[in-house]
Image (tube, rainbow, N blue to C red):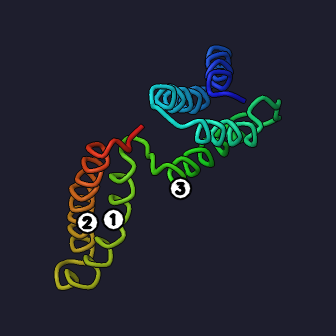
Amino acid sequence: MTIQQAYILFENLSVKASNKSEIRIYEKFLHILSKLKERTFSEEEIKSIENKLANLKLASNPQNTKKHFKRALTEFEKYLKETFSLISKGYYRNRYMGLGLSFGILFGVAILSNLEHSLGISIGLIGGMFVGLIMGNQKDAEAKSAGKIL
């Protein structure tokens, strides 16, 4: 399946869909595919992307379309990250905020435990999320300047 064929498929699915979460998945696919069309790839890289799109079986008619296309989107994003180091906008911000929240809880329980218990956890969460947000935005800015964001 070519990138153009996949784009047309998701445009048609997006028009027919009534569920907002399905539409978001289709729009994310459309965004990724349109950004891929704008980039210049070698002939081998284009064939590799088209093979991956064919392996995702996008043209099949599954019973649970939302689940099928969500899984396909996740797999395609993982493929683009591993093969071409291409990531979606906000990728590092989301990852680092999750890590920041995790470490913030640990920090709140371990270090700030001399405060009221819930206050220590709350301050740890807020601080961890804030630090994760800053670090993630820095990494996203680096990726954007390197041209790795779709």
- The mark closer to the camera, 2 or 3, is 3
Q: Position of residue 82 (x, y in %)?
A: 53, 55
In the picture, the disc for residue 112 is: none
Amino acid identity at mark 3: Glu
- The quarter of the rendered structure image containing the N terminus is top right
Residue at which label 3 appears: 82
Pick out the residue farthest to the left.
115
Left or right position of 85 against 117: right
Tell me the SS state at disc 2: helix
Q: Position of residue 119 (x, y in %)?
A: 21, 70
- Distance of label 2 from label 1 (alpha carbons): 5 Å
Q: Nearer the viewer, residue 55 or 95?
A: 55
- The mark closer to the camera, 3 or 1, is 3
Residue at which label 2 appears: 128
Left or right position of 38 against 73: left
Residue at which label 1 appears: 101
